[in-house]
């Protein structure tokens, strides 16, 4: 098995720390983004939603950083790279929205200008290392695979729409989003959806362990964000019901996937 390179492991640990901090600023400080974030985010439910994505990304990245092999880290690393590139692109598109007179705004711009090339540098080193990436010996349960496919495709599709046509979110999102926040949420949806589909392709409970924990954290945090900031929801009961039902399903999928991974590791 090809070992995870020290270079990539270090970079993943750094990225995990950054995601943890960003999640705290957004989820805990959802009502204070004008003072403690890179741009002002309204309503607070949007900030908390992005914070939930960052904390889920923290779980995903940390699991990859703690892996011993590239095969175990790969299902998280590629989606994280996609999210980083997309967030850099939307930052440059909406640069006028960022508070570049503050430390938070400057740090955001510097971080997302550095993250993609640093990750690419580490990935090139990783894939050039000798060794084989064998397939897992045990497949995911039959019931889990189709659910992950449906949820992954749904997140990819919705995320792509929000990236390409952010105004279209008005037709299906349960509260108002700006073009920037629509695209930021879309970036995370594409990345998490990709992680789900890579897990289906790898078909290995042990390699799904990190993604399953991130899935569980994301579902719970998104539901908590709605509970804490429900006054920000628009008067669209159908959109809200679909939104809550989807994250509830993601929570169940993550919990089941985590239990399957634990059972596989213990046997």
Image (cartoon, rainbow, N blue to C red):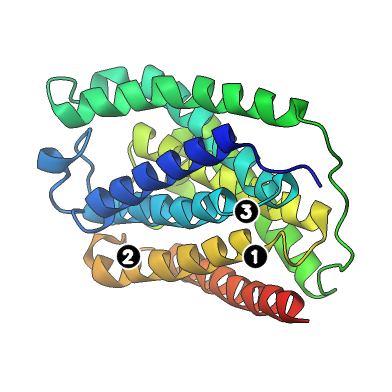
Separation (CA) of disc 1 from disc 2: 24 Å
Say above or below: 131 vs 171.
Answer: above
The residue under the point 69% across, 31% down is: 126
Q: Mark 1 vs mark 2: which is more N-terminal? A: 1
Q: Which mark is residue 171?
A: none
Mark 1 vs mark 2, foreground winner is: 1
Secondary structure, mark 1, is helix
Q: Residue 21, relative to residue 178: is it above or below?
A: below
Q: Where is residue 235 in the image (x, y as percent from the top left)?
A: 32, 63
Quadrant where the C terminus sits is bottom right
Mark closest to the chain's N terminus, 1 or 3: 3
Question: Which numbered disc covers residue 225?
Answer: 2
CA gap, disc 1 and disc 3? 11 Å
Please indicate whether residue 203 sits to the left or right of residue 64 in the image: right
Task: Say which residue label 3 marks.
Answer: 67
Q: How crowded is mark 1: few (under 14 residues within 10 Å), some or many (20 or more)?
A: many
Crowd class of label 3 (few under 14; some 14 to 19; many from 20; radius 10 Å)? some
| Numbered label attached to residue 209 | 1
Q: Where is residue 113 in the image (x, y as percent from the top left)?
A: 41, 19
């Amino acid at each position: 098995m090809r070992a995870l390179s020290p270079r990539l492991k270090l970079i993943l640990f750094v990225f995990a720390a950054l995601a943890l901090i960003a999640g705290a600023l957004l989820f805990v400080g959802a009502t204070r983004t004008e003072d403690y974030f890179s741009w002002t985010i309204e309503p607070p439910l949007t900030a908390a939603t992005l914070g939930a994505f960052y904390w889920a990304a923290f779980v995903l990245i940390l699991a990859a950083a703690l892996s011993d092999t590239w095969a175990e880290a790969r299902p998280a690393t590629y989606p994280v790279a996609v999210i980083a590139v997309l967030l850099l692109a939307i930052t440059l598109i909406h640069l006028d929205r960022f508070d570049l007179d503050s430390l938070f705004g400057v740090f955001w711009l510097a971080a997302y200008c550095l993250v993609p090339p640093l990750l690419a540098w580490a990935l090139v080193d990783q894939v050039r290392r000798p060794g084989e990436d064998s397939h897992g010996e045990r497949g995911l349960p039959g019931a889990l695979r189709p659910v992950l496919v449906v949820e992954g495709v749904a997140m990819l599709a919705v995320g792509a729409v929000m990236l390409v046509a952010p105004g279209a979110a008005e037709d299906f999102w349960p509260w108002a989003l700006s073009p920037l926040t629509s695209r930021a949420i879309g970036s995370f949806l594409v990345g998490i959806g990709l992680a789900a589909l890579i897990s289906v392709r790898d078909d290995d409970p042990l390699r799904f362990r990190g993604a399953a924990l991130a899935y569980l954290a994301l579902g719970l945090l998104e539901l908590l964000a709605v509970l804490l900031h429900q006054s920000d929801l628009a008067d669209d009961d159908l959109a809200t019901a679909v939104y809550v039902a989807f994250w509830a399903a993601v929570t169940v999928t993550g919990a089941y996937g985590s239990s399957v991974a634990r059972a596989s590791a213990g046997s």
